Each structure stands twice: as structure tokens, then as C-alpha cells.
Amino acid sequence: MSVVTTTTTIETGSVDDRGELLHADDATAQLCLSLVRLEAALVERGLGLGAVTQVRIHATEPGSASELVELVLERFGTGRAAPVVAWVSAARHEVPGMLVRLAADVAVTTPTREPTTNRPMNRRTDMNPSLTDTSTLRDAGTVHLPGDPGFEAATVPWNLAVVQRPAAVAVPRTVDEVARVVASATALGLRVAPQSTGHGAAALAAGSLDDVVLVRLHELTGVSVDPAARTARVLGGTLWRDVVAAAAPHGLAALHGSAGDVAVAGYVLGGGLSFYGRAHGLASSHVRAVELVTADGTVVRASEHDRPDLFWALRGGGGGNFGVVVAVEIDLIPVPDVVAGMLLWDLSKGSEVARAWARWTADLPESVTTSLRFLRFPPDPAMPPFLSGRSLVVIDGAILEDDDRAAELLAPLRALAPEVDTFGRMPAAGLVDVHMDPPGPVPSVSDHAMLGDLPDAAIDALVAVAGAGVEIPLICAELRHLGGALARPGHGALARLDGAYALFALSPAPTPEMAAIGESVTSSVVAALAPWANGSLFLNFADRGVDVATGFDADAWARLVEVRRTVDSDGVFAAAHPIGDRR
């Protein structure tokens, strides 16, 4: 027995059973009644709120958008099971006085019986039992199969635009559970895809997951700090915000990314680019040891002295190709406080500011790591007025200098008279919030390239596709300054970043139609800067399916493929960026 999942749409409005409008000209009341009728329609179908994957609010009053979206999110909650909520402007509705109508996409699972003959599988074809007819996986721990109440919620990644449909999803809470799940999946002839928060899930979901057990590690969390050794041991699903908070009381900091809700393991093993990067290099070079579950369910430790080839491959080659990473031990740095913050201007000054930043970054000490972004914010009363509904150019980052030297370095940028200037000394733990990344999951698409240099012509090209006056649904076009320690050989498969700047473009994708537009928009930004791209990629920034070999030099790639063949000879593990020919 298996299940087929289909999507149906339920439309509701503020009308009674005779079709007569209730709560005329009151958008909030109409929305509440529409939600009540939606829930009643779900109950009639034997479904709960968790079956709803997307809600579109068709409304005639744009000014109420933020309030109505917030009401829907409040009703559904903001956890992993929350649907994508989109606002659709409507000129009018069929019923006079109606201001709001809801359209909800609902996932419906229907049991089906498959033929008893074996279905071909990506890895091997000797076994394909019907998962609902066996207790093997269920006995391994918290495992959800299609049709189970917890299945849909457990498959939702951080990027809400991505839909994952694995054969099963496991949510282990202990290392032993991880080992049992992997061993059980392997015995059933299934592959395994490790995933923590689900950042970067788009590339994985682009391939078939029909024979994959998705292992979500967000319940396997914890961090312990050794202040004397300046290290932290971090369990597989732990987020950066928790590590930062644990290190701060000891006057220590970590080479974390720009968002606190990214999981440590995926970030550091993929390379890890932080606002300390130009001074300290890639985060992967600061990994001391990795504990992972291999294809036979064995927990192994990789370090400089234990399984050194595997340890080399994990640092920059990622963990998903070699096993399920259940813990990493990382170095911490003695940074109790730091000069950090942002400078902000209207996007109409984008060309002037970007040109000045490019010249400024050309001759900076390694103590300074910054980024420049063209940002577009939707109107939102919950945002500060200087952000809501505005298009901006922002420079942010960190400076590992004393206050006087930091002020001296910032002087050329401050001479451009920013509207907002928050640069100043702050506790190191505050750096994780400086970049203003979204505080929770969002639906989006992105694209990326590595640039060799940034002449005026490159700035002009960026302004032409993403600057003021360009009407595109782009959240951000970002340039991160590289070089310094990031360019010098470190440790592991990804020893350094080849490029002076990293380009990253992000667009909202609340609906499939918007996702298609976003792919075009972000691709156009990358294409505009193509003359200055060097052909390499930083895989932590690559959310689409790419030629993974372009993330490494030729020797490192050949060695990675060999390690993969040695550690996972049957191709059990499915990764977002697969090494070798296995997918």
C-alpha cells in the first residue's frame, strides 16, 4: 500500500449558506468568517489545518494587506506546518460589499495499491517493500510515512517555496535514533537525505525523492562550550543563535553566518562565510572534529587523527554526501565585542554608494568584512518606517579594530551622508542580527556567482538590472567582500574562496507563478554581472542544481569523488550538491 498526494483548492468567503454576504464592508470580519468556513470545509473532508499548503487572500483594499496576512498566520501558526500566505489584489468580487475571499490549496492523500513487482530505484533495484506494510522504519524512531498526520509538517524546509516528497521522513531526537533510521533505510534499499533546517533544500527537491528517507535533525540539538580550549561541541540540528548565546558569556564568538536560524553543521561543512571571514577565513577550516552516521548505521568520528581523508572531505565538501552529521566540534575566537552595524541610503543613491564601496574595499585591512545590498521592502506597518515600503542600498558588516581605527576606516563611507548609521561597538552576540535576514522561513528563489573584480562598469550593470526605477520583484541583490584570509589556503576540501566578491540575488516566491518570475529575475542579475564572473561557485550560496565540480579545484574534486566512493560505495546518501555521479 502507498499513497498518492493531490492538491485541491477550497474557496471560501463571508457568505451564509444561501450565498448572502455577511459583515459588509468589514474586511477583518469577512476574513474571520472565511477562515471559519474554510475550517468547516476541511472537517467535511476529514482534514486538518496541516493539510493546507497555501492560502491566497483575494482582497480589494491594499491598505489592509499586512493586517489580514497576520490574522491568517496567527490562525495557522508560524511553525514548520504553516502554509504560504499570499496577498492577491482584486478589483472587485462577485458579491457587492465583499472585500475578502480566500483560496486555499490543500494536499489530499489517497491510499493506492501498487503492483507487487519491484519499481526501479536510483540506487539499486533489489528491494522496494511497501513502507506502510512494514514496521522496520517505524521501529527505528520518530518516522512519518505519507498520509501520517505529521508527515507534511516534517517535510517543510526553511524555504517555503520548496516542496519535498520523500518516501518517509524521520525526526530523530538522539544519535541512536539516527543510527537506527539509517540502518533501517539501507536494509530496505532506500537512500537517506540528511537535513537540518532545510536551507538550500531546492537543489535536493529538484530530483526525485521517491526512494529517499529524509532525516530532519531539528530536534537533535544542543551545544557545550569548553572555554579553556575555546571550542564548542554542537549537535547536528543546532542553530547558530544557540551557539552564539552559549559562547558569549565566556567572551568568545563563532564564525557564524548572517542569520541566526541557520544550522551550524550544514553551514560549516559547506564552507561557512562570516563577517569575521577576511580575518579568520572559512568556518570549515575551524572544524576540529565531525561525528556522523555512515551507511551501515555506524557512528564514526573524523578528525585530523581519525579518518583524516574523510575529515578533509567533510570540511567544505559538506556532510550530506558522506553520512548524517550528528555533531561537530568547532573552534571559537576570543572576540567579546566588535564594531559592527549598517549604513543605509535610499536606492536612488545606489550607483554612488556602490562605486564608493567598490573603491573602499579595494584597499582594506583584513580586519574589515562587509557586504553591500540593494534591498526592496514591501509596505508593512510592523517594520520600522525607514524600511517599510522602501528601496534601499545598505552596507553592513564588522570591523575587528579599536573604536578610533574603525571610525577612521568608515570615514569615506560616512562622508556619503547615510540616512542611518548604526556602526558602533556591540557585544559580539549582536552581530548575528546586523544583516537583517528574515527572522523565519520564507518562500524564495535565488541565484549566485563569484566575481573576480568590481570595476565601475560592473556597478553600472548591477544598477541597470536592480537599481532605482527598475520595477522587479527582487528582495535583494547582494555583494559580499571576500579576499584576505578567505583567499589563502586553509584546511579541507574547500581550502579558499576563488574570487574578490560573492554575488547573491534573492526574489520572493509565494506562489509557483512568482517563483517562475523570481527565477528569471535573479538569473538576470547574475547574467548582468557575467562578464566579471570567474566561473567558480560557493555552494553554500547555490540553492539551485549546479555543476558541483565548479565549487572546487580539479585536484580537490577528484579527491572528493574518491573519498565518496570509499565512504559510501552504494550511493546511500542523497545530497543537495552530490559529489560524483550519484544523485
Image (cartoon, rainbow, N blue to C red):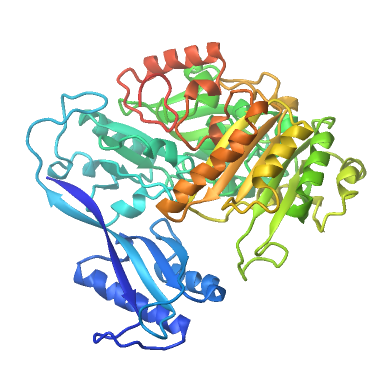
Who's the residue at 78% across and 54% down the image?
345
Question: Which is more toward the observer, 35 or 423?
Answer: 35
Instruction: Point out residue 142 in the picture as x, y percentages from the top left corner.
Output: 29, 47
Question: Which is more toward the observer, 115 or 524?
Answer: 524
Q: Quadrant of the N terminus?
A: top left
Q: Quadrant of the C terminus?
A: top left
Residue 286 in sight in this render: yes
* Side of 423 relative to 452 (left or right): right
Who's the residue at 45% across and 63% down the image?
86
Residue 177 in sight in this render: no
Who's the residue at 68% across and 35% down the image?
228
Residue at the extreme left of the image, as rendered: 116
Who's the residue at 59% across and 24% down the image?
536
257 lies above or below 294: below
Question: Which is more toward the observer, 380 or 113?
Answer: 380
* Side of 380 relative to 567 (left or right): right
Instruction: Point out residue 483 in the picture as x, y percentages from the top left corner.
Output: 73, 27
Total tally of numbered discs in the picture? 0
Instruction: Point out residue 162 in the picture as x, y percentages from the top left corner.
Output: 41, 47
8 lies above or below 538: below
* Side of 83 relative to 468 (left or right): left
Instruction: Point out residue 314 in the picture as x, y percentages from the top left corner.
Output: 50, 24
* Side of 258 relative to 127 (left or right): right
